[in-house]
Amino acid sequence: MIHARGLARTYTTRRGDVDAVRGVDLDVEAGEIVGFLGPNGAGKTTTLRMLTTLLRPTRGEATVAGADLRRDPATVRRRIGYVAQSGSTASEARAGEEVVDHALLYGLERSVAVTRGQELFGQLELDGLWDRKAGSLSGGQRRRLDIALGLIHTPRLVFLDEPTTGLDPQARANLWTHVRGLRDTRGSTVFLTTHYLDEADALCDRILVIDAGQIVAQGSPEELKQRVSGDAIVLTATQPSDVARIAAVAARLPGSSEAVVDGSVVEVRVPQGRTQLAGLLRALDADGLEVDGVELRRPTLDDVFLTLTGRSLRDGEQSRDSADTTDGEAA
Amino acid sequence: MTTTESPVFLDEQAGRSTFLRDSSTVFRRAMRISLRNPVWSVMGLLQPVLYLCLFGPLLEPIAGQLGATNAYQMFVPGLLVQLGMFGALFVGFGLIGEWRDGVIEAERVSPAPRAALVLGRVTRDVIVVFIQGVVLCSVAFLFGLEAPFWGVVLGIVTGALLAAAFASASYAIALTLKSEDALAPLMNGIALPLLLLSGILLPITAATAPAWLNTLSNLNPVKHVVSGIRAQFNGDFGTPTAIWGVVTTIALAAIGMWFGARTFKREDG
């Protein structure tokens, strides 16, 4: 559905050239939900804008929805839906009319557009808002209206740029259901960007991790977590004097990292925590070592990101305002 | 949850999307929004009507000195041009609002031809200026305008066509600057000298102006539009002045449209 090779974008600013995206290769198959994960300013939006024909790549080639990005952008546009980060409806206009007008630009008949629009309003829980001004909708409603706009022509490939930013937890969970529904009931391919780890984790079949304009890792959320970090096993010794011996036993597990001791707590990282935990407990028992507490901590995508880039995704979040400005300029 | 949904992709209704159909979609959307909130259109009319009511009467006693038999016959063409310029130059502000809402981006990612996105909006602006022109001339008749009916109609149409040029330019500049704060002084900076050098209040001729001012004003295409509409108001449809005015207006509109479409087409930050 998407095949990109060496996609790059360089911006010329007063301070010199800025490489927003430095040669991205990516392949997305039909029916996949693929997440583009990275901190603000990593090049997610720029890549998305290139793939949706809004920005001409400085270098590189891509085929999107079966059409060549450079030679046939019109066909690409016809076949994709794009839900931008910044919204897509005028505050002054009425919700239903915006959706129908957008459908007409895709060549749909008015009657088809109205039926399809009302269907989408039902699915996206926008019932009764057809005649409301877009500006009078709540943040979550307006976001779902954007999505209705992006889906009005039932595209085979849907791009969502930070779809849940600014939504409350319930609205986010709702939206995830809709995104999964796109794939499950319609067979659409979904490509989304996010800087939320839980979102990428919960929603995506596959994740591409982008940092500083390059893809630094890809795989299913499970693969990424296993490959990079492994699981943490945290043991609390009943007798503080046993700590050293517990640490020694834990460190003997196949593939184990050095055990870290903190007071009466021992932490060790192993490749397959779930299957290795039972063996560890038996080995401790055989040596007559007692533990009060056992905790198995699955790695998070934040661990992955930290391992890959040496930086935490959440660090990026703190400096969000400045990062957003950079991204905005870049986008 | 999706029992009513059709599993087919509707995304390939090729051939149904045409330049005229898309322009008309964009036009109707823009017109609808303007009609629901007519405050701007009324405000745009206020300025020339105020000039007509509060400045026009001053010209009545000196009409003869300016070479006119009827003061309003000389003055209203200038007001039509002022309407076409000022009404249209500020449409860019609305576009910046739409851009901020993400509307432009959403339209640019659709297969609609870029020129249709401009033409649809400009058509709305032209029609708004046309209606404003009709209202203005009706008020002018009440004040004592005497001019041939078809000359007035042609003058209103020419003024509306001039609006197409300035509206397109305004959209192009707005989409490039993307900031109301930058747009306002630039628009005033363009509009004021163009307006003063076009002789809309008093005709600039070899008889009324110093040579350098007359020469300078002759370089301003808007002056030829004003002179053209004055000729139309006098019923001189076939004179070089009238024809030259129409040709200039059409040329300006064409340049404006090209400039506007080019800006919508150019992918940018």
Image (spheres, coloured by chain):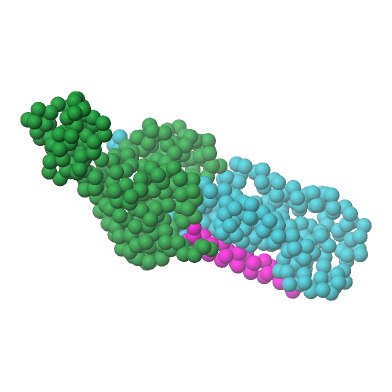
Chain colours: A green, B cyan
Side of B230 where A101 appears, left or right: left
Residue A167 place in picture, x, y as percent = 42, 36
Question: On the image, which quarter does residue B183 sit in?
Answer: bottom right
Judged left or right of residue B170, residue B136 is right
At x 60% / y 67%, what residue is drawn? Answer: B254
B208 versus B163 height, above or below: below
Query: Main SS type for the magenta part?
Result: helix
Instruction: Tell me if residue B249 is in the magenta stretch.
Output: yes
Q: Residue B22's spot in the image, x, y percent?
A: 48, 55
Residue A26 locus on image (x, y percent): 29, 57
Horizontal side of B147 relative to A125 (left or right) equals: right
Q: In this rendering, is residue A198 above or below B93?
A: above
Q: Work out whether B238 lies above or below A276.
A: below
Furthest toward the left, the residue is A286
User: Which residue sits at x=53%, y=63%?
Assistant: A14
Image point 71% across, 72% down: which residue? B244
Residue A109 in view here: no
What span is colored magenta in the figure?
B240-269
Q: Is residue A174 visible?
A: yes
Of A22 and B13, the residue lying toward us? A22
Quarter occupied by the N terminus of chain B: top left
Query: Would you say residue B258 sits in the magenta stretch?
Result: yes
Rendered location of residue B135, percent (x, y)? 73, 49
Between B174 and A106, the one nearer to me in the picture: B174
Q: How many marks?
A: 0
Q: Residue at x 55, y 52 (%)?
A: B27
